[in-house]
Image (cartoon, helix red, strand yellow):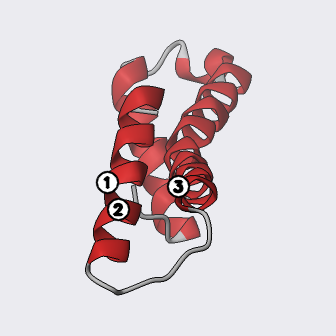
Amino acid sequence: MKLKRSQVEYISHQVVKHLVREGVIEVEDPVVATEVLQQAFTKDLMVEDHLNDEVRQLLEEHADKMAGGSVEYHEMFKLVKAKLVRERKLIL
């Protein structure tokens, strides 16, 4: 996750505050709305972290095949990650 927890909390609070002020949404409890938005942001931000973990695992499983190759680990990491992003139609 590229944002700190405090940044996610701040952004969530500001979004809810702005939407309520502009009359776009009505909420009974802004604190609860902020927490729900925070959870949604965090879940979305964790997608890339989970993808990175999966790519690392795939590369570890195939390390013996890559050992004699001319492609470096970080290059292979980017290629595999890009392929999974395309296949899964993820937005990072």
Calculate the distance from the C-alpha at mark 3 to the C-alpha at mark 2: 9 Å
Q: Position of residue 50 (x, y in %)?
A: 63, 39
Q: Which amino acid, by three-letter code, is at mark 2?
A: Lys
Looking at the rendered structure, the secondary structure element under dot 1 is helix
Nearer the observer, 78 or 13: 13
Looking at the rendered structure, the secondary structure element under dot 3 is helix
Residue at (35% x, 62% y) in the render:
17
Residue at (46% x, 66% y) in the render:
86
Q: Position of residue 80 (x, y in %)?
A: 49, 44
Residue on which disc 3 sits: 34
Q: Is residue 18 above or below residue 78?
A: below
Q: Residues within 10 Å of mark 3 (few under 14, many from 20)?
A: many
Residue at (47% x, 45% y) in the render:
81
User: In the image as oriented, which residue stretches furthest toward the front?
Assistant: 28
Residue on which disc 1 sits: 14
Q: Is residue 81 above or below residue 14?
A: above
- Which is more N-terminal, label 3 or label 1? 1
User: In the image as oriented, which residue stretches furthest toward the right?
Assistant: 61
Q: In the picture, residue 57 is in which quadrant?
A: top right
Q: Which amino acid, by three-letter code, is at mark 3?
A: Thr
Q: Which mark is residue 17?
A: 2
Determine whether, in the image, residue 70 is placed left or right of residue 85: left
